[in-house]
Amino acid sequence: MILSVRDLQVSFPVGRLMNRSAILGVAGVSFDIAAGETFALVGESGSGKTTLARAVNLLQPISAGEITFDGKRIDGLKGAATKPLRREMAMMFQDPVGSLSPRVQVRDIVTEPFRVHGVEADLRAEADRLLSLVGLSGDFANRFPHQLSGGQARRVGVARAIALNPKLIIADEPTAGLDVSVQGEVLNLLNDLRERLGLAMLIITHNLHVVHHVADRMAVMYLGRFVETGETEAIFQAPAHPYTAALLSANPEPDPDKAKDRISLPAEVPSLLARPTGCEFHTRCPWAQSRCGTEAPAAQGTDRRIACHFPLSPGARPPAVQETAS
Amino acid sequence: MTVLSIHNLNVTFSTEGGDLHALKDVSFEVPERRIVGIVGESGCGKSTLINAILGLLADNGRVSGGEMMFQGRDLSRLSPREMTALRGPQIATVFQDPMGALNPVISVGRQMTNIQYRSGLSNAEKAERAVAMLRRVRIPDPEAALARFPHQFSGGMKQRIAIAMALMMEPALLIADEPTTALDATLEVATIELLQELQAQIGCSVLFISHHLGVIAELCEDVVVMYAGEVVERGTTRQVFNSPRHPYTERLLDCDPARQSSRTRQLPTIPGEIPDLRARPPGCIFAPRCHRRAPVCDTPPPDEAVQDGHKARCHMVTP
Ligand SMILES: Nc1ncnc2c1ncn2[C@@H]1O[C@H](COP(=O)(O)OP(=O)(O)OP(=O)(O)O)[C@@H](O)[C@H]1O
Ligand SMILES: Nc1ncnc2c1ncn2[C@@H]1O[C@H](COP(=O)(O)OP(=O)(O)OP(=O)(O)O)[C@@H](O)[C@H]1O
Ligand code: SF4
Ligand code: SF4
Ligand SMILES: [Mg+2]
Ligand SMILES: [Mg+2]
């Protein structure tokens, strides 16, 4: 395994002096990523995906759990000790332009990892090589971030992430805001590197079509926990957790005449300050039964893990919809 | 009736390497009470178009030709002051990041009453309208929500609040630039449904930009396809999605991973790049990447009508 995460928790302090408390942004998750494997993280906005990615990359202190990278425990590493790690584990951020400094030219942005890690290289040639790898012509080297379109900025982000041939890339929404062709290029590029260099990938995205095509395995997050994990194809074929089923059914299709068969959820997302009792999804779950409000389901299974008292059978429809249909 | 009519719009940025022609002869209409989508390659000029409409082009950019008629007035001829008066009450915007529209240190209620400063309503009436609007976008417990600050809401709720603020003054036109990109699929669908509902209630028009072709298919009645700063095809969403006529549109639709029925690691792409916009070729702008290119393509293609309201800028298109 290139990456093993066990019972990871991240808490954030909230409130002011008198009524200080903490929320769990990541509430205990475990997973493994093998060399060359692509692992996707999907789930609700605010469910803790970015926080988890930042924790794995040691950009965010953890409050419990273990992180093992390439056979070595890395949780707890600080300051200079994290430096070698950042060569091997590259992070691509969600906000491409925001993560690029406005006054620095593209040439310096893509070759920054060489300078940070003191790697000797012909930076001019490296900039050209990296830019052409991501499909940008050489004259982009002289541009500033505000002179790039959203897609161009993203490619610059990919170029920087792959500069030092990392073993693991953590990509947070690597293709949000890209057109489908450039999105394909970026994903093919990452796939290419995966095949050539055995690169493993942790990819976070709201685009379920992308997950379906590129991820070997996936995890579905809700309120900081994994509610379902397993082989991507198996989960898409037959989602077993009700939240997964609702999420996958919401995926908009590029066909104006396509019939929609959605499992809709109440919009109210519970607050992390007041987590629901029992199964934390019971306040929105169309299949919830009385037991769900009191008893928290433990994740069952090995390859395919599902945290639900009543996993769905393939093609299950919410009870209310079945009533109106009959 | 059309709310917005763009005719032969040209926008130029001056750059070190010379003038960059970001929009060239862009023409399309946003009819009253209709939702019009814009799709196109990253860097094709969608944000530039919006900024031109809003009078917010970067300092090195200018409208170098054409007109943008909004309620009988050409937006490119209005003074900055007149534009400021239009932005918000008449032309409202929602962007990908709701925090661009929300002030982190002012309560949601204050912000929602502040934007009604021109309404002439009393404070109590303004608060009432704010609550009603929050209820419409399905923020739970809207009275209590007024006292809360933006960071106390989730991303999806912040986007709903941004939509509530944008539609508060019942604008004639809402411009939405990738408003659902940062949302998960369930929230994305909920937000689309919400926009549809509010648009019908308020009777405004919407100009909606997204790279998510599924979202466009679901939400928009008309669609405008842009490539390298030009409108290459437009029509109803059904016309364009079901029978695309411009080669770029065909390729774009083919590239959607949603249309790949079996799982593949190698996703389809359109080989090649957008040409350097500082040196536009005299003929068809898509020619270097086009699979149907012919000698005639070295001359500018006509804006050929396929059928009622469906047009494509290509030599090979016949009615
Ligand atoms: N620095 C912080 N202080 C307090 N709370 C935080 C902080 N950072 C994140 N959170 C909270 O932790 C939770 C998880 O946030 P995170 O950004 O990881 O979600 P996400 O799954 O990446 O969401 P999205 O899909 O919208 O990007 C959210 O409720 C968020 O408000
Ligand atoms: N201020 C500027 N100076 C010079 N060139 C610019 C400027 N702003 C944009 N451009 C260029 O104009 C073209 C259009 O950019 P624009 O941001 O409008 O694209 P877009 O369609 O919104 O792209 P995306 O989908 O990636 O957001 C791009 O080639 C971009 O590099
Ligand atoms: S345990 Fe109950 S509430 Fe939770 S997901 Fe399963 S059925 Fe729904
Ligand atoms: S005009 Fe010619 S090159 Fe241009 S899109 Fe049509 S066929 Fe292709
Ligand atoms: Mg995130
Ligand atoms: Mg843009």
Image: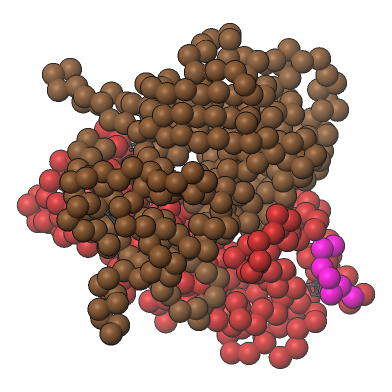
Does the magenta stretch mainly form a helix, a strand or a loop?
loop
Q: Between B120 and A148, which is closer to the camera in this rendering?
A: A148
List x then y, in percent, for residue A313: 40, 65
Instruction: Give the quarter of the figure containing the N terminus of chain B.
Output: bottom left
Q: Residue at x 78, y 64 (%)?
A: B285
Extreme-top residue of the structure:
A80
Q: Give the percent coordinates (x, y) of residue A175.
A: 59, 48
Q: Is residue B105 magenta?
A: no
Residue B301 found in image quarter: bottom right
The x and y percentages for residue A4 are: 54, 29
Q: Which chain is brown?
A: A
Q: How many marks?
A: 0
Q: Which quarter of the rendered image does ligand 1 occupy?
A: top left
Q: Quadrant of residue B199?
A: bottom left
Q: Is residue B8 left or right of residue B100?
A: right
Q: Residue at x 56, y 51 (%)?
A: A231
Residue A72 in which image quadrant: top right
Give how far across and how far down residue A109 sits, in percent. Answer: 68, 28
Residue at 83% over, 70% down:
B291
Residue placed furthest toward the right: B295
Asked whether B194 or A49 is in front, the reply is A49
Can residue B68 be spotted in the picture?
no
Relative vertical location of residue B51 with respect to residue B154 in this rendering, above or below? below
Q: Is residue A313 visible?
A: yes
Which span of residues is magenta-colored? Answer: B288-294
Up the image or down, B141 lies above or below A107; here it is below
Q: Colour of chain B?
A: red
